[in-house]
Image (cartoon, rainbow, N blue to C red):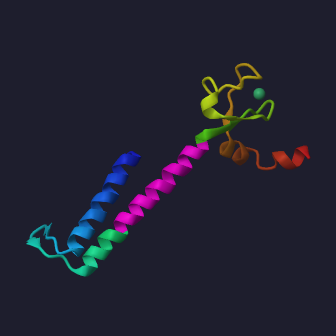
Amino acid sequence: MNSFGWYLLGIILLLDGMWALFGGKTSFKGKGWVHPSIDYSILMIILGSIFLIGTRLYFKNKQSITKYTICPNCKQTYNFKDLKDGKCPTCKDTNTIEIEQYYKDNPFKDEDEN
Ligand SMILES: [Zn+2]
């Protein structure tokens, strides 16, 4: 499921909770249309908020990972969208690596160079 799907789910839960809170009826399986309890409304609002905030945070992190890359050859960092096919413009045909991935693979690289 993409971010839009998760957002939609969060919004539906949130609206359902608010609808129930203001006296709307919700259809439960086997029970038909009933007025849900306050507990149900609050639970839906909390769940909806978690989905919305969680989705936002998750996809924000995911984006930032591919936003900046580093060239393993000249150690120059780049904005990924400025690069052509993710290749370093200085060292021709050298693929740049996502910064987070680079530091995961080379955790002591900085200290060695100092
Ligand atoms: Zn380079």
Give coordinates of residue 89: x percent, y percent.
72, 23
Identity of the residue furthest to the top in this view: 92
Main SS, magenta region, reads: helix
Give coordinates of residue 31: x percent, y percent.
9, 72
Q: As displayed, is residue 17 above or below residue 84? A: below
The residues colored magenta run 47-65
Identity of the residue furthest to the front in this view: 22
- The part of the image, by quadrant, that contains residue 83 is top right
Q: Which of 55 and 93 is in front in this view?
A: 55
What residue is shown at x 89% (from left), y 43% (from top)? 113
Q: As displayed, is residue 50 above or below residue 34? A: above
Q: As displayed, is residue 47 above or below residue 97? A: below
Give coordinates of residue 20: x percent, y percent.
21, 72
Magenta residue check for 96:
no
- Give the quadrant of ligand 1: top right
Left or right of 88 in this view: 45: left
Q: Can the viewer see residue 84?
A: yes
Q: Nearer the viewer, residue 78 or 101?
A: 78
Q: Which of 40 and 106 is in front in this view?
A: 40
Give coordinates of residue 38: x percent, y percent.
25, 80
Number of labels in the image equals 0
Q: Can the viewer see residue 31?
A: no
Identity of the residue furthest to the bottom in this view: 38
Magenta residue check for 57:
yes
